[in-house]
Amino acid sequence: MSDLQLEKPLSKSMKGGQVKLIQEWVTLHGCATGIDNEYGPATVAAVKLFQAKVKLPQTGVVDQATFDKLVAPMRRALKPIAPNGRTLGQLGLAYAQQHLKQGPREVGKPNCGPWVRLYMDGNEGEQWFWCAGFATFCLRQASHTLDQKMPVLRSFGVRQIADAAKAARTFLGRPTTVAQRKRIHPGALFLEEGGRTGYLHTGMVVNVAGSVFHTIEGNSNPGGSNNGFEVIARTRAFGPAYDFALV
């Protein structure tokens, strides 16, 4: 993956290439600078500030050592997890929790940045809502680890996930009874109804607790937006707006 490999050292006055990536990562690490693909004085200063934070020589040049520190959160998120007897859904949830711990979020413009590109197979931009990309990415990690078939459709669209679940008979529409809710196991996807396609948001279920369910979801925020800016853990109340794709 190019976002995890340094093509060449980057320094003052360079333009294009991976300069934008460096500006994104220093900003994600709290050393904010403009994201304009030009390695100007502000980028040099931001890189030096980051280097000081991670106890590297403050050269303002992104060499391999600096780059490795910049992308370390993503590498930690992608680290394989031993199954240890987990089901595919449980392992998918473990991967989601591993990602959550690294604080994935957008940077620069809406639905942009290295985390968005990771979950969206290189795509980014205002129209690329990434909640489904995040949830199905984590389940794909689990599927690869266990060498099993994906339990849901790997997709960027919630509508497509719902349709595939219906075809596979793993779709649960608006569960209202205790028995129905007991079918929702860790790693299942909630499918929030709404929008022009019939669905507008999704995320992974951590567990069900009576009238509520706990989640890890991407492209959201503390208010539960379907176009937020981060991966976040939330609690949602069951209601007529939620269907589920079971795993």
Image (cartoon, rainbow, N blue to C red):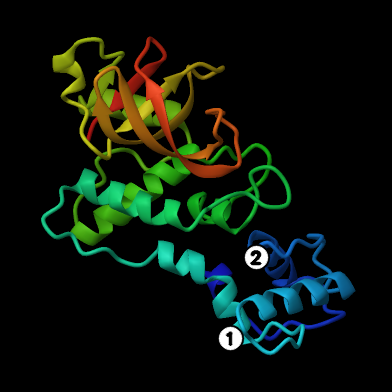
Q: Residue at x 50, y 66 (%)?
A: 73
Q: Residue at x 75, y 88 (%)?
A: 59
- Residue 4's disc is none
Quarter residue 45 falls in: bottom right
Q: Residue at x 40, y 24 (%)?
A: 236
Label 2 element class: helix
Q: Nearer the viewer, residue 176 or 141?
A: 176
Give the amino acid type for the residue marked by disc 1 in the picture: Ala
Q: Quadrant of the C terminus?
A: top left
Is label 1 in contact with label 2 (beta carbons under 8 Å)? no
Could one spot residue 156 in this view of the protein? no
Q: Nearer the viewer, residue 163 or 138?
A: 138
Q: Which residue is mark 1?
A: 65
The x and y percentages for residue 150 are: 26, 46
Image position of 180 with respect to 246: above or below: above
The x and y percentages for residue 196 are: 56, 17
The x and y percentages for residue 165 are: 28, 28
Q: Which residue is mark 2?
A: 25
The x and y percentages for residue 79 are: 36, 67
Residue neighbourhood size for the residue with mark 2, other residues' Cα within 10 Å, grouped as few (<14), some (14–19), many (≥20): many
| Mark 1 vs mark 2, CA separation in Å | 14 Å
Quarter residue 151 falls in: top left
93 lies left or right of 52: left
Could one spot residue 65 in this view of the protein? yes
161 lies left or right of 196: left
Residue neighbourhood size for the residue with mark 1, other residues' Cα within 10 Å, grouped as few (<14), some (14–19), many (≥20): few
Label 1 element class: helix
Quarter residue 238 falls in: top left
Q: Residue at x 59, y 59 (%)?
A: 114
Image position of 97 with respect to 38: above or below: above
Whichever of labels 1 and 2 marks the residue nearer the N terminus, that label is 2
Give the amino acid type for the residue marked by disc 2 in the picture: Trp
